[in-house]
Structures are given as C-alpha cells and as structure tokens.
Amino acid sequence: MQRIMVVGAGQMGSGIAQVAAQAGYQVYLRDIEDRFVQRGLGVIEKFLSRDVAKGRRTEEEKAAILGRITGTVDLAPAAQCDLVIEAIVENLEAKLALFRELDQICPETTLFASNTSSLPITQLAAVTRRPDRFIGMHFMNPVPVMQLVEVIRGIATSDETYARIRSLAEAMGKTPVEVNDFPGFVSNRVLMPMLNEAMFCVYEGIAGVEEVDTVMKLGMNHPMGPLTLADFIGLDTCLSIMNVLYEGFKDPKYRPCPLLVQMVQAGYLGRKSGRGFYIYDENGATPMKR
Ligand SMILES: CC(=O)CC(=O)SCCNC(=O)CCNC(=O)[C@H](O)C(C)(C)COP(=O)(O)OP(=O)(O)OC[C@H]1O[C@@H](n2cnc3c(N)ncnc32)[C@H](O)[C@@H]1OP(=O)(O)O
Ligand SMILES: NC(=O)C1=CN([C@@H]2O[C@H](COP(=O)(O)OP(=O)(O)OC[C@H]3O[C@@H](n4cnc5c(N)ncnc54)[C@H](O)[C@@H]3O)[C@@H](O)[C@H]2O)C=CC1
C-alpha cells in the first residue's frame, strides 16, 4: 500500500491524514470546499509544529510529513489510491452517495474503509461492487493521540482485507481491535449511553454541567467529563450515534436525551461550533446554565 485518500477534512479526517503521512504514506485529503481542506491542513500543521517545539520532531521531518499530504476538492485522485478512508459527516445518505461515486471512480482493487462511529458497515459496503474489500476503520478522537483503531468487519469483509487494514493500523502506530458489525460496534455501544445519561442528569435538573463532569472526572478518573467529551466529539455526531443505537436495537434505553436533540436543532454542536454544553470563547469554557 502506498497511496491513501482520506475523504472529509474535519477533526477526524485531518487526524487520519496526519497519522497516515507520519507512517510514510502519500495522502490525498479531500473535502467539498477548499476552505475546509485548508482548515484541516492548518490543524495538522499546528500539531506538527507543537511536536517540533517539544523536540519530538525536527523541522525537516515536519516538512516531509506535510509534503506527503495533498489537499484537494477533487475526488478523481481516488483512482490512483490503494485505499480510501471515508471520514465525512455521520449521515447515512451522504456516505452511501459518496461510496457509490467512489465505486465508479476506483479500480476494483482499491480498498474502501469507513471511519463511521456507528453506521452499518454491511449496508455501506452493499452499494459498492466490492463488499469483500470494504471495512470499518474507526479511529478515536484526537486521532494522533489515541491508541485504538476499532476494525469492524462487515458481513462480507474478506480475511485478506481485514489483514491488510490491521497491518496498516499497526504501521500507523495504533492498536487494532477486531469487532463485528452491530449498531455502535463496541466503542459507542458502551460510551454513548453514558454520555446520553450525563445529559439526562442535566435535563432532569439533578446537577449542573460542571458538577456532572466533575463527578466523573474526580470520581472515576476519566480524563474529560462526559459533557466536555460530548462537546469534543460533536453533539451532531452524538445524536446520530444515539439514533443508530435506538433504531438498530429498537430498545427505549437508547432514546436520545431531548436536551441533546434540542441543542443540535439550535446549532449548538459543541466545540466545533463554539457552543455546546459549554460556551467556548476567549474566556475558555463556560458551562451552560439550565
Ligand atoms: C465518538 C467516536 O466514535 C469515538 C471517539 O473518538 S470517542 C472519544 C475518545 N476520546 C476520548 O475519550 C478522549 C478523552 N480525553 C483525553 O484522553 C484527553 O483529555 C486528551 C488526550 C484529549 C487531552 O489530554 P489533556 O492532558 O487533557 O490535554 P493536553 O495536555 O492539552 O493534551 C495532551 C496531549 O494531547 C495532544 N493533543 C490534544 N489534542 C490533540 C489533537 N486534536 N491532535 C493532536 N494532538 C492533540 C496535545 O498536544 C498534548 O500532547 P503533549 O502535551 O505531549 O504535547
Ligand atoms: N468526532 C469524533 O469524536 C469522532 C467521529 N467519528 C466519525 O468520523 C466522521 C467525521 O466526523 P468529524 O470529523 O467529527 O466531523 P466534522 O464535522 O469535523 O467533519 C466532517 C467533514 O466532512 C466534510 N464532508 C461532508 N460531506 C463530504 C463529502 N461528500 N466529501 C468530502 N467531505 C465531506 C465536511 O465538510 C467536514 O469538513 C463521522 O462519521 C463521525 O461519526 C469517528 C470517531 C470519533
């Protein structure tokens, strides 16, 4: 494997492009508008500069990594890639449309991976002519820091595809864990109901935002409180995942908290929109009042 296209230059796509380039691969980073591509490249530049400032990398290494990443709004270079990793918004229709288009552009040998947090890998694979060469490659946020890649096998994923993606994750310095394709996989089946429950604590007036976070940080040694983490993940992504769990299992225990639904309707998407359970501005993070 030599060339990888990452589609979606948001918080996950930019991180995936960075770790792929750090591992020596040539990377295309594609988004729908150039300003999103530039934003993604800017984030990579910032974190590599931090590595240089901390003495973990040289300026030359940073330049070489950046030199391996080509930003683009064009999907056509996917035809020259051995693997396409999709990291666009968590929306089934958008992902299906993208994979249909990629399937037309890419030779049959190209592997497809989705970084989806919860959508069925089997269903995404089924709109392509290569369900055996289709897999879930679920990185954790922030990608350059977190050790795990959850590797999700769809019903038709071949052993060879799995072996190649497992090796790639290891080459990127990550630890792959194999799971099967059921709603939320393992990571979000376990994590997201906890975040949703923290939201219910605020919604029902049991405690304030900061208090809920402090309980989990100091009481359970979590690095971030659940509401800080939900803001970090993106509330739109959290809601999409809860809906996939709710609809996938038809079990009311996965109902999304009405406060989460309302906040997403208001455009309060967390850190990326400047407001979620906290307001992010020059004063830092101020908890929302309820
Ligand atoms: C929703 C899904 O489908 C799946 C998911 O991803 S769920 C989310 C999974 N992620 C988590 O649970 C993250 C929980 N939080 C944490 O582990 C930590 O708070 C954290 C690693 C994000 C930050 O750590 P911290 O100690 O609080 O802050 P900070 O000191 O600023 O950062 C620690 C290091 O991470 C680095 N870092 C933070 N954010 C980064 C980013 N976006 N990209 C690259 N590096 C980053 C910092 O540069 C810093 O490194 P150095 O100090 O060595 O330079
Ligand atoms: N945020 C998180 O903590 C995690 C998210 N994920 C998953 O990763 C994916 C991306 O999430 P984020 O990076 O957080 O979202 P984001 O909102 O930061 O970025 C999404 C990007 O995709 C772009 N995009 C939308 N349609 C596109 C298309 N057709 N072609 C190219 N680009 C397109 C958008 O312009 C945007 O830049 C989602 O599937 C999400 O569920 C997975 C693990 C963790």
Image (cartoon, rainbow, N blue to C red):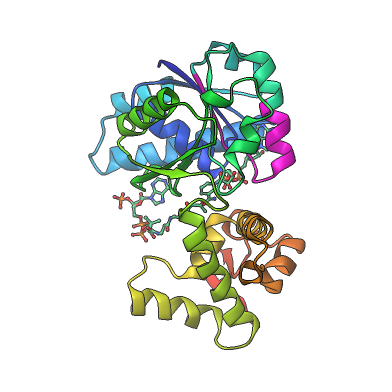
Residue at 57% x, 43% y: name it. 116
- In the displayed orientation, state which residue is furthest to the right: 265
Residue 251 magenta: no
Q: Residue 61: image x %, image y %?
A: 30, 26
Quick check: 236 above or below 284?
above
Quick check: 284 above or below 205?
above
Quick check: 129 above or below 216?
above
- The answer to whether one can see residue 74 in this image is no
In which quadrant will I find the C terminus? bottom right
**Residue segment shown in magenta:** 83-99
- In the displayed orientation, state which residue is furthest to the left: 55
In which quadrant will I find the N terminus? top left
Q: Nearer the viewer, residue 13 or 261?
A: 261
- In the displayed orientation, state which residue is furthest to the bottom: 206
Residue 96 magenta: yes
Residue at 63% x, 64% y: name it. 275
Q: Residue 233: image x %, image y %?
A: 54, 55
Q: Residue 260: image x %, image y %?
A: 67, 68
Q: Where ligand 2 lies, by quadrant?
A: top right
Q: Residue 249: image x %, image y %?
A: 63, 59
Q: Where on the picture, by quarter, is residue 174?
A: top left
